[in-house]
């Protein structure tokens, strides 16, 4: 706030705070994976992204328990500390390990998710749900996961992950195939071979 006093904020805990600079705002989740943290599960993160207009131009995700610092800047690349990140190069969905979010009480469409999960599990090598969307996306950027999908998710959970995956060479779209991930609260991300295949499988699950 001191170094960029005119920038606005979008905060999990405080909502939106408009600044004098209408073009820039920080999108911050001070603790992504709160339930993990409260249960003593060492998988949670701090997530900060900088938005300019409709575009995320920088982001950091810090895995507190593992002391891993993921960061990305538009046109510069995505990094884990000083190591350059690239998404997985796998081209067959049946070889991929994917991450997803799971609807919980009062959130999301459970019936739709169950159909999607059933369809994807029949086509891939495995699905993981770790409970911190920012780290799921960081792991896609690092090539640890081959892809990630989730719906009904907040902007502060995914903002930093969007630029991490993009700068790591990944392909990110919303559930409708557009680029309004923050507005729709939906993400389907992978490399440019797997993402269209995954998106098609997710869509087929709810239209058949």
Image (spheres, grey):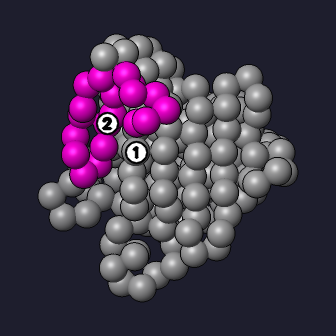
Which residues fall within the magenta stretch?
A: 1-19
Given residues 51 and 181, the one toward you in this image is 51
In this picture, residue 186 sits left or right of residue 163: left
- Magenta: main secondary structure equals loop
Q: Is residue 9 inside the magenta stretch?
A: yes
Given residues 83 and 36, the one toward you in this image is 83
Given residues 78 and 205, the one toward you in this image is 78
Contact flag, marks 2 and 1 (Cβ < 8 Å): yes
Residue position for label 2 = 10
In this picture, residue 29 sits left or right of residue 86: left
Quarter the N terminus occupies: top left
Residue 135: x and y in percent read: 55, 57
Q: 62 above or below 84?
A: below
Given residues 108 and 80, the one toward you in this image is 80
Residue at the spot 42% in from the left edge and 85% down from the top edge: 40
Residue 203: x and y in percent read: 43, 35
Residue at the spot 58% in from the left edge and 58% down from the top edge: 62
Q: Residues within 10 Å of mark 1 (few under 14, many from 20)?
A: many
Q: Quadrant of residue 74?
A: top right
Residue position for label 1 = 28
Q: 103 above or below 185?
A: below
């Amino acid at each position: 706030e001191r170094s960029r006093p005119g920038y606005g904020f979008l905060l999990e805990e405080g909502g939106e705070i408009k600044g004098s600079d209408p073009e820039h705002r920080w999108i911050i989740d001070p603790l992504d994976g709160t339930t993990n943290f409260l249960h003593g599960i060492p998988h949670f993160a701090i997530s900060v992204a900088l938005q300019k207009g409709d575009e995320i131009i920088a982001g950091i995700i810090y895995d507190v328990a593992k002391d891993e610092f993921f960061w990305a800047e538009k046109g510069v690349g995505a990094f884990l500390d000083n190591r350059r990140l690239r998404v997985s190069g796998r081209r067959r969905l049946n070889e991929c390990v994917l991450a997803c979010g799971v609807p919980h009480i009062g959130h999301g469409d459970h019936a739709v998710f169950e159909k999607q999960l059933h369809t994807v599990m029949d086509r891939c090598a495995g699905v993981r749900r770790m409970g911190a969307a920012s780290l799921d996306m960081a792991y896609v950027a690092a090539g640890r996961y081959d892809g990630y999908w989730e719906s009904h998710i907040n902007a502060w959970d995914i903002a930093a992950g969007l630029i991490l995956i993009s700068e790591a060479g990944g392909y990110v779209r919303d559930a409708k195939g557009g680029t309004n991930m923050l507005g729709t609260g939906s993400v389907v991300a992978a490399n440019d071979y797997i993402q269209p295949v995954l998106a098609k499988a997710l869509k087929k699950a709810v239209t058949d």
